Image: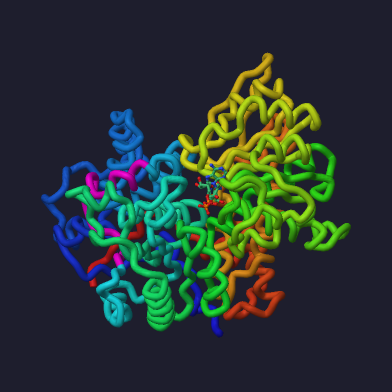
Amino acid sequence: MQHENLLQLPSSNDPLRVDRRGLDILNSPWLNKGTSFTLEERQELGLSGLLPPFVADMEEQVQRVKENYLHHSDPLDKYIFLTGLADRNVTLFYSFLMENLVETTPIMYTPTVGRACQKFGHIYRKNRGMYLQRRHKGRIAEVLENWPKSEVDIIVISDGSRILGLGDLGANGMGIPIGKLVLYVVGAGLHPDRTLPILLDVGTDNEQLLNDPLYLGMGHRRVDEGTFYEIIDEFVAAATARWPHVLIQWEDFTNDKAFPLLARHRERAPSFNDDIQGTGAVALAGLLAAVHHQESTLSEQRIVFFGAGSASVGVANMICTAIADEGRMSTAQARELIWLVDSRGLVSTQRGGALQEHKQAYARQDMTADSLMEVVRQVQPTVLIGASGQPGSFTEDIIKVMNRHCKRPIVFALSNPTSKSECTAEQVYHWTDGTAIFASGSPFGPVRHSGKIFIPGQGNNMFIFPGIGLGAIASGATQVTDSMFHIAAKTLAQMVTDEELAAGTLYPDLGKIRQISLAIATAVCRLAWDDGIARYDEPEDIREYVRRCMWHPEYRPYVPV
Ligand code: NAI
């Protein structure tokens, strides 16, 4: 296949031929440049007199946005303000986000997006993305035709059944596919005009929402499993028929659906589940950086997970692959270094009752235990990873018992949003007298302990998924493989500097996200070509090719058609 089929983007100097005039342009968030239209453009496009006289550049516009943004103190108000900006001027929205990336990422995504979802029906302003519903069953292809873009590179789809750690939020979950795609654009330069958020509204079992008069979803309970899978199958067939190369990212499905969905569709369409695979890769990257810092190896660790859902099993799978990759043991032997604890205690073959399929490979045959404390006492872990959505579950006693057997315990409290974190950064540093190596799912600020400043790392999936997405799209990969996540984790871990490690940070500065995504996407592309699963011809210089695929929020000159 020729390279002109790829997403190579025009440069910011290439004029865009515009077939609209006047308010039609100003009212289109994709075309609007606000006060940045030049005098010639105003003259030629029927904009004269419709704008204040001053011609601003992007920098001045960003400054004005910042001033307005800072008027809001509540993060949710900031979210609403920025969403309004995206509704008016997409280019300026992304320019502002990229200039203020570290400040705005927790607004557009976790933790604030969690609150936005909880109140989605109450703060709703304008349509974005698509809602597929039970009543569309049998005609999903026809409904997808209503999306006005002939090119879609990526769809993020959720059924809102497990939003962050906040449970079933039904159609309110739409905030997540929207937010995630914003991060793809910011993080890896996917073209915003070619992204599609979808909320699959198959009902909700959340009583509060069902009784909320402002809830915007279908007011019925969740459909049965058979209907759910039929709708999903129909969606995949319809989406890949309309956009044959589209990458599908499954997002925030409950784990009883997340694993089967991934298994069922990953070979039919390029698709992945970020909660499973992205989390796996980002946690593995943190762990690789931590063991590197300790001059140890993964196979020397004893790893206890609190929570045995999508995130934990995704991380466990990725760790086992990486341990096998170290060459000292097989994947099966690597599983022996892992203990999963769920709401019923240690996941074990001896505890009675059925075990969900995704837990079975990790079920211990050698012991039972009812509580996390009991497991910590018996196993004496070197690594404790929380992905349970249970705030405060890493107590002082548990961390201290762990620290008794392990001089530098590695503690990851991955549950999101911040209110669900198993413990705070401050607690861990204090309880272990600064010896712990800590990372979290939601951001924590720097902590001072005994005169030293610790900067906790955020195991943010944003380090991984944008680069994976860009690499898969740029190569036209027919599948998104586990090896891609493994290489992404290794690439990320290598980008942490010694200074960052010394300050306790296991991840690079998020401000470098575009460089990180470029490196990951390049590695992913290389793998796709090596493995023979890329649809496109291999370019001479993969890195340069990927770099040219990245969209930047810049205004192009407009000329009338
Ligand atoms: P999930 O629903 O698939 O799994 C939750 C697990 O926690 C289940 O195994 C459940 O049995 C267990 N659990 C629930 N209550 C418990 C209790 N009282 N004691 C012990 N275990 C209990 O959810 P998933 O997708 O695994 O996500 C879990 C958390 O991880 C969420 O808060 C989510 O936001 C977070 N997460 C963080 C990521 C990151 O930091 N990069 C990425 C993905 C998820």
Report whether 171 appears left or right of 263.
left
Outermost residue, front side: 352
Q: Nearer the viewer, residue 179 or 350?
A: 350
Q: Is residue 355 visible?
A: yes
Residue 121: where, in percent of width, then height? Answer: 24, 49
Identify the residue at horizontal 16%, vertical 56% (top origin): 47
Outermost residue, top side: 451
First to last magenta residue range: 115-131
Q: Is residue 519 visible?
A: no
Outermost residue, left side: 49
Q: Let me know if residue 1 is in the magenta part.
A: no
Q: Nearer the viewer, residue 143 or 245?
A: 143
Identify the residue at horizontal 57%, vertical 42% (top origin): 414
Above or below for 258 versus 401:
below
Report whether 264 appears left or right of 234.
right
Residue 544: where, in percent of width, then height? Answer: 61, 64
Q: In the picture, which quadrant includes the N terminus?
A: bottom right
Report whether 196 appears left or right of 304.
left
Q: Nearer the viewer, residue 102 or 229?
A: 229
Report whether 432 appears left or right of 142.
right
Residue 292: where, in percent of width, then height? Answer: 79, 42
Identify the residue at horizontal 71%, vertical 49% (top origin): 339
Q: Nearer the viewer, residue 400 or 352?
A: 352
Identify the residue at horizontal 79%, vertical 56% (top origin): 334
Residue 36: where, in percent of width, then height? Answer: 28, 49
| Residue 388 placement: quadrant | top right
Q: In the picture, which quadrant includes the C terminus?
A: bottom left
| Residue 330 placement: quadrant | bottom right
